[in-house]
Every structure is written in C-alpha cells, then in structure tokens.
Amino acid sequence: MIPRYSRKLLKDIWEDQNKFQIWLDIEILASSAMEQLGQIPKGTTSKIKKKAKFKVKEIEQIEKKTKHDVIAFLTNVAKYVGPESRFIHKGLTSSDILDTSFSIQLSQASHIIKKGLEDYGKVLKKLALKHKHTVCIGRSHGIHAETTTFGLKILGYFEENKRNLERLKKAINQIQTIQMSGPIGTYSNIDQRVEKIVAKKLKFSIEPVSTQIIPRDRHAELFSVFSLIASSLERLATEIRHLQRTEVLEVEEGFGKGQKGSSAMPHKKNPILSENVSGLAKVIRSLVIPALENITTWHERDISHSSVERINAPNATITLDFAVQRMINIINNLVVHKKNMLLNVELLKGLPFSQNALIFLIENGVSREDAYKIVQECALKTWNEKTDFRVNLLSHPTLSKFNLSKKIDQIFTNNNLFKNVDLIFKRVI
C-alpha cells in the first residue's frame, strides 16, 4: 500500500519485523506447551526465550538460497539459540506457523478498524443529535420529495455503522482461529494438547478440521465485511458530494487555511476527501474477489492463496483503516448550511406537502383517484408556471367547497415530521 493512504499503526502490522516476531512467539508458545506436557526437557523454553532472536536482513539472505521463508526463519533463529533450537518447530509444519500468524495479524488489524468504526459511530451520533430537528428536503431519484431532517439523514448512517460493527465482530471471531496439527492436519507427530494450550494462551479458537491450512472461507467472510464497510462509507461520502454541489450547497467539507481547490481556478472548494473515500471503497471492494477465489485450493494444501494474501491483506486493512479515519475527519469538520437547507425546501413553492393535500382531500370524502387528479393539477401548475402551490390549491374550483383558507395550515405543516423523528431517534439511540 502506498504511504499516502497508510497509517503507521496498520502498516507496522504487516511489516516483516512484526510477522517474524509473531512466528517466534508462536514457536515459543508451542515449545512451552510441549515442555509442560513433558515432551521436551525441562528448562528448554526458558533457554530458547533467553537466546532467541532474528534479523530480517539475515532471513532474507538465507531465503535466497532455501527458497522457503519458514526454513530461512528457523535457520536464522537457530543460529542464536544454539543446541536447544532442535526442539523448535518439533512436529509442526510451516502452515501451523503461517496460518496462525496470519490469523493474529488479521485480528490485530481488524481490532484497529473496529476501534475506528466505534469512533466513527460516536461522531455520527453527535452530528445526528445536533441536527435532529434541522429541516431539509428529502430526495428520491434526485428530485425533491418531502421534508426530513438532516439529523435523521445522519441517523441512518449511524444505524448502518452499528450493523457493520456487529458484522465485523462476528468476522473477527471467525478469524481468531489457530491450527497446530502438523502435516495434512492429522496430528501425526504433535500432541493435540499442544494446540489447545497455545490457543488458550492466545485466546483464540482451534480449527476443528484443518487440512494443513485453515479453510479460507473464514478469511473470505472477513474481506466481505471489509467490502460492506467500505460501501457504507462511500454511501455517506456520495451524499456529502451531492449536497456540496453548488446548486445545492447544504453541507460542505471543511476547508483549511492555506488549502487550494484548483491549480487554475482560485475560487474552487471541492469535496476531495469524500471523493477520495469513494475511490478507496472501489479498491477495497475489488479485493473481496481474490479472497473468495482463495477458498478453493488443491486437495489438503497448496500455496495458491499465499501470494494473494501477501498483497490482499495489507492492502485491504490499511486502505479501510485510512478510509474510516478520513470519514471521521470529514464528519468532525463538516460545515452544515441550515439556511440553504430551508431555501431548498422552499424552492418548489410548497410542493413537498402534496401528500398532505392528497390525504386531506381523502379524509374529507374525495375518492383517491379524484383527489390525486386535483392535487396533481395544482402541482403541475406550480411546476410549469412557478406559482405557489398553496395559492393553486386555494384557487382550484373543485376545492372551494372545503373552505380551505381556514384549513390550509393543516396541509402545510411539519408537525407529523417532528413527532416521528423523535420516535425514530428513540428507537435507534
């Protein structure tokens, strides 16, 4: 992943230094378990822990010859540990270390993303509550529909984020799985109790049926959740982009001191951060396909998934983490133009209350078909002649018998909106 879209916190998880340290920790845990079970001499683990270390550059040099990363790692560690190194990796196969380590790295990265989503939820909740009763126009098909509130708009994203958090927690639980079952996953030369002891130390589950690798449906589920989260972020980013358009201008991204919008047009203030999130979401979604493809491997084990994961896992987690943090920044600095929201509500001269007019007529004995026809006639006159919808209703010949002038305020009101906004907020928060 390029530095522009990387936070060091996530990037470090996928660096070789962290990976090899996890490998070493796993080997030491396995050694400790074997010693506990009396399968290697007492005191072995303490000697290994005291001497064990590795150097990334040295491992890289060894791997050039061995063409095998785990063997290169073990050779390098053995150089520093000495005679006790013969007990390291006893009865294990490479995948026991690789897959367990991969689970740990994915768990580390996913927990950081989870924390980001929790913070994102907090800023969404704050914004929703602040604008709980800030009236704005709702749109369907991009066309003005009825009035809503900006807080209610944001509340929908808050609720969606709650669902994403639950999805991520479940996917993390699926991925927090280890294997330590040896070649072909049959425990031929390793005691099953070693795996149990290591899993308990890590607070992970055991893969019930390992085929020498942890089945990749677990990983695919996590990457699918990453894609859902990215799409949710993009949904709000797209809304902000629409609302920042010059003709709308109901919200806009914060514009920092000294910030420039265009190399050619000094007046420009563009929604570049939201556009960036939209772009990153495309990348994250594209990575779910390789994760799904990785579910299929030959027989009990091959390494067709390995090269994919070396690229996929860092890119997906680093990019998603960055996108979450970017959305938090956008929401924290969002400029909300309440006056423009009201101006846009008034833009169609009362048309957003057409359903109120329809229901008023129905409740006063007019058939739905006739009521719809009357209200649409008045509405189309407003559309075509730019006249006021209220005036058109009052002047419609069929409506004169209803004494509308004394009841018109019952039609042009947001009372029902506010009553139900409170209900929805209570349901969610």
Image (tube, rainbow, N blue to C red):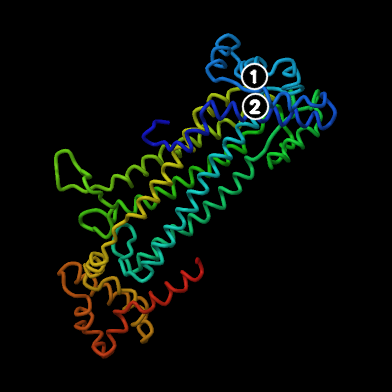
Quadrant location, the N terminus = top left
The quarter of the displayed image where residue 55 is located: top right
Can you tell which mark lies on residue 24? 2
Give the total of numbered labels: 2
Which residue shows up at 20% across the image and 43% down it? Answer: 260
The quarter of the displayed image where residue 210 is located: top right
Mark 1 residue crowding within 10 angstroms, few (<14) / some (14–19) / many (20+): many
Q: Reply above or below: 427 against 122.
A: below
Q: Is residue 378 left or right of residue 159?
A: left
Badge 1 marks a residue whose secondary structure is helix
Q: Reply above or below: 159 against 309.
A: below
Q: Could you say where residue 198 lies in the image, as x and y percent from the top left?
A: 73, 35
Q: Is residue 229 left or right of residue 85?
A: left
**Mark-to-mark CA distance, 2 and 1:** 8 Å
Q: Name the amino acid, label 1.
A: Val
Q: Reply above or below: 218 against 429.
A: above
Residue in front for this viewpoint, 357 or 245:
245
Q: Could you say where residue 108 lies in the image, as x and y percent from the top left?
A: 56, 39
Residue in front for this viewpoint, 140 or 20:
20
Q: Is residue 121 left or right of residue 65?
A: left
Q: Could you say where residue 117 lies in the image, as x and y percent from the top left?
A: 48, 50
Badge 2 marks a residue whose secondary structure is helix
Can you tell which mark lies on residue 77? 1
Q: Name the amino acid, label 2.
A: Leu
Q: Reply above or below: 353 against 86.
A: below
Q: Is residue 36 left or right of residue 243?
A: right
Q: Could you say where residue 381 lies in the image, as x and y percent from the top left?
A: 19, 71
